[in-house]
Amino acid sequence: MSVHLDKAAASRRTILVTGGAGFIGSHLCERLLERGDIVWCLDNNSTGSLDNVGAIMASKRFRLIDRDIIQPLPLHVDEIYNLACPASPAHYQADPIRTTRTCVLGALNVLDLAHRCGARVLQASTSEIYGEPEVHPQRETYWGHVNPIGARACYDEGKRCAESLFFDYHRSRGVAIRIARIFNTYGPRMQADDGRIVSNFIVQALRDRPLTVYGDGRQTRSFCYVRDMVDALIRLMDAPDDLTGPMNLGNPHEVPVIYLADRIIAMTGASASIVFKPLPPDDPSRRRPDIGCARRALGWEPVVSLEEGLAATVDYFRAVLQDKGRATAGHDGGRSDGVCGTIGRADARLERPSALHPVEPRAAGGAGARR
């Protein structure tokens, strides 16, 4: 028995997930823990929430590090998933200079860490790389059509610069990289105020408020459920080193925005109407990934239908809004104003920046040195 445990401990990977308390990051942390890895979650909680990782905080193989990715990372890890960046227009446009810093300085810091540790590093890039696409569906060989000085450029160009840095580190310093171009992803743990289509529509419908559709609603999007996306990210990380990407990850099922609004109204049983507002600048008219590369190289494609995924997401938001309503009625001063409700307490596994120091993973039963 002891020999078996020693072998299991020796085979564990110590994995850093930046942005790990965010929407996709928290689901990824859970999946990595389920398969037996040691997971370090780095997040400054600017758009994430400790509630998202509340269910795994007690795990001895989980460690939460309160730190901004624009600061150097004095750690030692085997793999890095770089998901640290605001991903919704409402959030990344709120402080565009900081968004660019997060994209560029964050990429430099995780790449320096990967080079120092000999670690694999996966960059969570984005379909925004393609801008307002002139090619449809979008393939990885398409270079994009991006406005470099528009309101969305902090994110679009920041992610494009990060991809450039990843390939420069790969070519000049031999860093093992993976680049995932993530298309619209949705599911439980999205924020109600993040400005994304799915969360906006569901929360508006559940509150019996008019659903806000920008433009005429004929613009299209493709929506991938978070469970499918996490599966794809792990498969890409575990792929052979010559599979650097970039690789499109998303659901190729394309629907008009107005169709999504109608389906959510029907699924929630809301009596909400639809209000049309002007289309924001540089908002893409069509978005659909060509996932042929992921199908061939990873054996991956989404399996959760839009109906199934929306039903789970509606259930999540209904529960969250009911919980928030109960807290408001009870005048619970411990509640936050955000959709996630109570912010989880920082226990012994929460590392503050002043306490961060290089550590080596323990041989067995834990994620390295703890206070």
Image: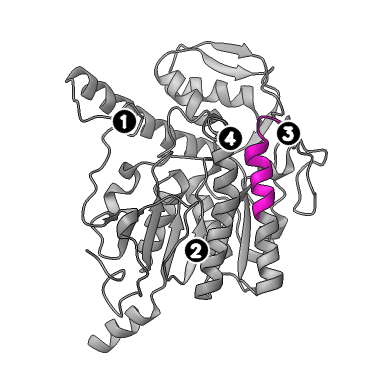
Residue 39 location (% of width, % of height):
37, 63
Q: Give the mark nearer the N terminus: 2 vs 1.
A: 2
Q: How far apart are marks 4 and 2 (CA)?
A: 25 Å
Q: In this view, does 87 lie to the left or right of 215?
A: left
Residue 110 location (% of width, % of height):
53, 61
Q: Which image quarter is the N terminus in? A: bottom left
Mark 4 is on which residue type?
A: Pro
Q: Which image quarter is the C terminus in? A: bottom left
Mark 3 is on which residue type?
A: Ile
Residue 86 location (% of width, % of height):
52, 40
Q: Is residue 2 left or right of residue 89?
A: left
Q: Give the mark nearer the N terminus: 2 vs 3.
A: 2
Q: With respect to residue 82, does 344 lie above or below?
A: above
Q: Hey, which quadrant is residue 123 in on the image?
A: bottom right
On the image, numbered disc 2 is attached to which residue? Answer: 80
Q: Is the residue under label 3 in contact with that under label 2 (CB below 8 Å)? A: no
Q: Give the mark nearer the N terminus: 4 vs 2.
A: 2
Q: Give the mark nearer the N terminus: 4 vs 1.
A: 4
Magenta span includes 328: no
Q: How far apart are marks 1 and 3 (CA)?
A: 40 Å
Disc 2 packing (10 Å; few <14; some 14–19; many ≥20):
many
Q: Hey, which quadrant is residue 239 in on the image?
A: bottom right
Disc 1 packing (10 Å; few <14; some 14–19; many ≥20):
few
Q: With respect to residue 327, does 157 lie above or below?
A: below
Characterize the magenta stretch by its predominant secondary structure. helix
Q: Is the residue under label 3 in contact with that under label 1 (CB below 8 Å)? A: no
